């Protein structure tokens, strides 16, 4: 029995969702995949899958073994690459999940620059705002915008993220400028619907006291660029990160509001699982991104001009 091949086959079945799909990806017969899974289960003395005629679901034992198998296979690949690499060249794949707007607007050029320095790296990028399970879905790392909670993951801060209230001059001319937080209740508000609660905006006053304002957003969306464009079109007041609206603020098509108040701090982080040996590719990419975004983010310079 080849433990490495059996373990690798098991991981491919989990990732593809079926024996047939795994066989296609590995370019082997389905009978080979089935045999390897059976050998692995016999060796371990447990069932790794709940099998039905239509699908295969991991058992609790299978789920735990999958997480360990992914790490072991990654360690083996890393050892092989480290041994075979010449003159420090980085090779191999990086699977990264990235927030949609931040990724498209600010990470593309950075990733392209990294690839110019390391042309043998192969990126698999998932542009999505959902929270993924890095281990279960096989990601090497994630870029996330958050107020980071405690977890088993390791995080390195890339950049601070500021969030501001703003609206178009046209909207403010028609509806008036809110000079107090309570006035927001009377305005049309545009809200990001992936936050919780959607109807409650939170800010700090000059003394550092947290204030919660209940609003009734008449337009909700799960994409910041859509909300930015709606605000520019004069549809209402939006609470939005500066990295999405900095160009509009510089042009004057959006105007910051209630600037004496500050939203709870967020940051962009590079997040990756704890492993015994951090991949050289992950380490190099994270180090590059930290250096690339050090200092005051260029998208926040607009606030000094407003």
Image (cartoon, helix red, strand yellow):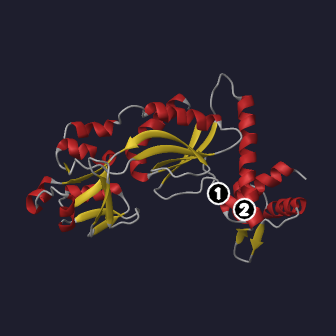
Residue furthest out toward the top: 87
Secondary element at image label 1: loop
| 96 w.r.t. 285: above or below | below
Evaluate whether residue 193 shows in this view: yes
Q: Using the rendered view, name the quadrant where residue 51 is placed.
A: bottom right
The image position of residue 180, as x and y in percent, is 18, 57
**Does residue 282 appear to the left or right of 180 in the view shown?**
right
Of mark 2 and mark 1, the one earlier in the sequence is 2
Res 136 label: 1
Res 63 label: 2
Label 2 and label 1: CA atoms lie apart by: 8 Å
| Contact? badges 2 and 1 (CB < 8 Å) | yes
| 137 w.r.t. 107: above or below | below
| 207 w.r.t. 47: above or below | above
271 or 84, nearer to the observer: 271
Residue furthest out toward the bottom: 53
């Amino acid at each position: 029995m080849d433990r490495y091949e059996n373990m690798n086959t098991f991981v491919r079945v989990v990732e593809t969702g079926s024996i047939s799909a795994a066989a296609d990806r590995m370019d082997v017969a389905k009978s080979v995949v089935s045999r390897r899974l059976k050998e692995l289960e016999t060796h371990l003395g447990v069932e790794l899958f709940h099998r039905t005629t239509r699908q295969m679901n991991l058992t609790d034992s299978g789920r735990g073994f999958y997480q360990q198998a992914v790490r072991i296979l990654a360690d083996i690949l890393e050892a092989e690459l480290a041994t075979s690499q010449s003159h420090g060249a980085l090779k191999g794949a990086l699977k990264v999940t990235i927030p949609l707007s931040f990724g498209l607007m600010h990470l593309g050029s950075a990733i392209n620059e990294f690839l110019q320095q390391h042309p043998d790296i192969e990126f698999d990028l998932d542009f999505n705002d959902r929270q993924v399970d890095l281990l279960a879905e096989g990601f090497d790392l994630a870029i996330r915008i958050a107020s980071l909670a405690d977890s088993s993951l390791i995080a390195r801060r890339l950049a601070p993220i500021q969030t501001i209230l703003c609206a178009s001059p046209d909207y403010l001319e028609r509806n008036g400028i809110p000079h107090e937080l309570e006035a927001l209740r009377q305005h049309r508000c545009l809200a990001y619907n992936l936050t919780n609660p959607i109807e409650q905006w939170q800010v700090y006053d000059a003394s550092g006291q947290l204030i919660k304002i209940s609003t009734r957003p008449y337009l909700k969306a799960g994409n910041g660029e859509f909300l930015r464009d709606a605000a520019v079109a004069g549809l209402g007041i939006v609470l939005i990160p500066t990295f999405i609206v900095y160009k509009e603020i510089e042009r004057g098509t959006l105007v910051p509001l209630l600037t004496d108040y500050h939203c709870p701090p967020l940051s962009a982080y590079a997040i990756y699982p704890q492993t015994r040996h951090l991949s050289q590719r992950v380490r190099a990419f994270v180090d590059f991104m930290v250096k690339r975004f050090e200092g005051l983010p260029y998208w926040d310079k607009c606030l000094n001009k407003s």
